[in-house]
Image (cartoon, rainbow, N blue to C red):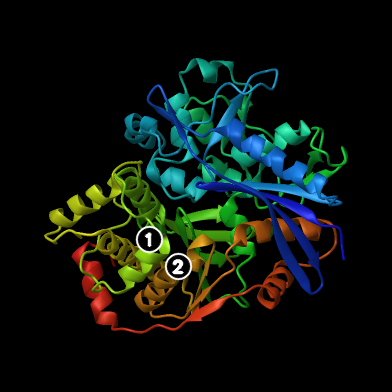
Amino acid sequence: MNRPVVAVDLGASSARVLCGHVAADTLELTELHRVANDPVTICGTLHWDILALYSAVLTGLRTAARKGIDVASVGVDSWAVDYGLLDADGVLLGNPVHYRDSRTDRVFDDALATVGADRLYQSTGIQIMSINTIFQLVAARDTAQMAAAKTLLLIPDLIGYWLTGTMGAELTNASTTQLFDLDTQDWAYDLIDTLGLPRHIFPPLWAPGDLVGELTVDCGLSPGTPVTAVGSHDTASAVVAVPASGEEFGYISCGTWSLVGVELDAPVRSTAGRAANFTNERGVDGTIRYLRNVMGLWLLQESLRVWRENGLDTDLAELLAKAAREPAFGAVVDPNAPEFLPPGDMPARIADACRRTGQTPPQTPPAVVRCILDSLALGHREVIRLAAELTGRDLDTVHIVGGGSRNELLCQLTADACGLPVVAGPVEATAIGNVLVQARSLGVVGDLADMRRLVGATQEVRRYEPSGRAADWAAAAARVGLN
């Protein structure tokens, strides 16, 4: 068997370090370390605890060394849009701010007016969201940190820098910033200049498969171990691991967010696509992830947190079983309503949203869970239908990958809502995609199609056939203004 690689997969709710073994007919993952990723509020600002995350990465690498694993390569992926600023000595100037922090609220409208929505979309192809890096940087533009900043590093690139001493930005994640020009394949310096942002902080770009550098930290592994650029935006890695053949498939990378879309060879920057707020993010091998965000299991995660704090039973398996027995469409909400973005009392917000639309709010935790899952399925339905319409694709299957693929009720509801078969799995899609790109850089696997064939041949998936009445889903969607 070929030498294993290590995937560092930093998600919005947990950080994982996994070992991957890849051969012609083998794809195996072993978890080395996992911790919760808990943000921290400091002086009213929500931050990521980046040092705790880096410590978890080192623990995972040291675990590999302690187990005697002869690691051939390391790759790092994470969520998108967030960053750290470094000074001229390469020292981090402060804990990265969480994209759910409210700091962009005060600058969003003015920044958008300054650059113009049409210009912004034609240049970058990215959906306009207040969480995007472009708006975060405008919010930080006049701060002391920005004045002292020499370099901006996105989260996986920051971890990679600490491991190797090399600074740069990987393309799949850079494209999510809304400061990457799809035509020049470089930073969108015209937008940067228009917004008064410093050009010098934007680092060189590299692509999945490129060498980032070699390990320089004392973690027990060989000092010269390569760190390889992967699809460092976790969704880019997850889409690599979609076990699909052909082009007529939709995907949902389902976790804290649901990233719902299709894979294209070229961006679509139509007026209709901009109106529908679809995004053109770079994928592995020059592909385009044409997708839109749906709020995802964040709604459920925050509800569980609130119930735990109030001393209520939060056994998820039991809640899901009870939710499956709740009446369909008892209450539904638009999962992308802006009030659901920040942390807070999600069950109370859901109840308020139901009242505003003339519905009786769910009264029990199982009823809230059913409301969330019905609503997410409606959100998935809307985006899958729009993606097919905007690209002319005749979709025959929807693949759900990531942690949400374990949620049997959500998978079945999504099949029912979309009127298409759902293939669920693999669960650790992001880590698998990370591992496969590293394995290809080592000559172990071939192109994207070969990677997906290997995933399909080795990973467990489950198929859900659509049932129920399309008219019922259409009526529920109309109740909250969804298509």
Tell me the quadrant of the picture where the N terminus can be found. Answer: bottom right
Is residue 396 visible in the rendered image? The answer is no
In space, the residues marked 1 and 2 are separated at their CA atoms by: 33 Å
Helix, strand or loop at label 1? It is helix
Give the residue at x 71% y 44%: 60
Question: Is 407 placed left or right of 215 in the picture?
Answer: left
Which amino acid type is shown beneath numbered disc 1?
Ala
Vertical placement of residue 410 versus 209, above or below: below
Which amino acid type is shown beneath numbered disc 2?
Asn
Task: Give whichever of 332, 35 is nearer the camera.
Answer: 35
Name the N-terminal-most of marks 1 and 2. 1
Vertical placement of residue 452 versus 302, above or below: below
Q: Position of residue 14 (x, y in %)?
A: 54, 47
Vertical placement of residue 476 versus 185, above or below: below
Res. 272 mark: 1
Vertical placement of residue 74 versus 51, above or below: below
Within 10 angstroms of label 2, few (less than 14), some, or many (20 or more) residues?
Answer: some
Residue receiving disc 2: 407
